[in-house]
Amino acid sequence: MVLFAIRNAADPARVVAYRHHWLGIGQLSQLRRLARAEGCREMVLIGGVVRPRIRELLLDLEGLRFAWRVVQPFRGGDNHLLSQLLAQLESYGFTIRGAHEIAPQIVVGVGPLGSRRPGAAEQADIARALAVLNANSPFDVGQAAVVAGNRVLAIEGPEGTDQMLARVAAMRRGVRGTGVLVKAPKAGQDRRVDLPSIGPRTIDAAASAGLAGIAVLAGSSIIAEPDRFAREADRANLFAVGVRADGSAE
């Protein structure tokens, strides 16, 4: 296994534990050359990258040669961009695998992830948030929403989940224990990449936003450090749960 880490996106402290190469986000020919030299036949895309400005891409020769195919998708949403990126990597002869295919244990199942469960009011908020996310799917907006008392407080945009929750926290100073963060993939999304994810940091952000808990679509979401996640959710008095498409967790 070899890791191709994106500069200014990957954590160096984590990268050094593996055989690795550092790359700029626009260095496609470098990626292809290094991956072939390493004997790679399959690739897994993991982690997140803040969408850069086009002028920050610093495309290499290969990137420039395919500039229309690579840069043009930045005018669309994330799904459009990622589908073009996958097609580009496949054109090099690599097979793209989903992280959940390689490590199925990271996929969230149906049911609670800690000791707490959502009540009837939270279940209603979960169902409403899922409906909102499903309705927004054709517009390629985001994978997360916050609903409290049947009121939509926030929908994730390009800023990502943490920044969305920071907005909610600023909006609800002093409010505690109400509302739910819900994450689910967009309809028609390629499940090999950009699945909704949660981890210990999500707990901190949700607690700061005064929420009662977190729900993710089971079978289509991934979790980092599940044991630590469950402990910290219990410590923060938050429920965390994997739900079906109708919002049920049983």
Image: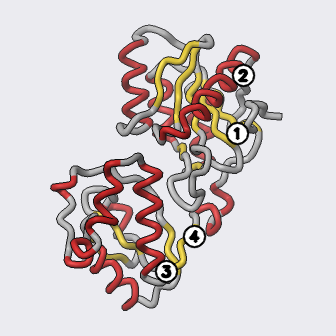
Q: What amino acid is labelled 4 in the image?
A: Arg
Query: Upstream in the sequence, badge 1 or badge 4?
Result: 4
Q: Which mark is residue 94?
A: 3
Q: Is residue 31 above or below residue 198?
A: below
Q: How is the image coloured?
A: secondary structure
Residue at which label 4 appears: 97
In the visual, does 203 lie left or right of 48?
right
Find residue 41 and report its horizontal and vertical position in percent: 51, 85
Residue at 26% in and 62% down: 7
Q: Quadrant of the C terminus?
A: top right
Query: Upstream in the sequence, badge 1 or badge 3?
Result: 3
Residue at which label 1 appears: 242
Q: Secondary structure at mark 2?
A: helix
Q: Visible in this render: residue 22?
A: no
Q: What amino acid is labelled 1 in the image?
A: Gly
Rate crowding at label 2 as few (under 14), some (14 to 19) or many (20 or more) other CA atoms within 10 Å.
some
Q: Is residue 99 above or below residue 230?
A: below
Mark 1 and 4 residues: CB-CB less than 8 Å, in contact? Answer: no
- Spatial distance from mark 4 to mark 3, Cα to Cα? 10 Å
Residue sitting nearer the eye, 231 or 238: 238
Mark 4 and 3 residues: CB-CB less than 8 Å, in contact? Answer: no
Residue at 53% in and 24% down: 146
Q: What amino acid is labelled 3 in the image?
A: Phe
Find residue 35 and report its horizontal and vertical position in percent: 39, 83
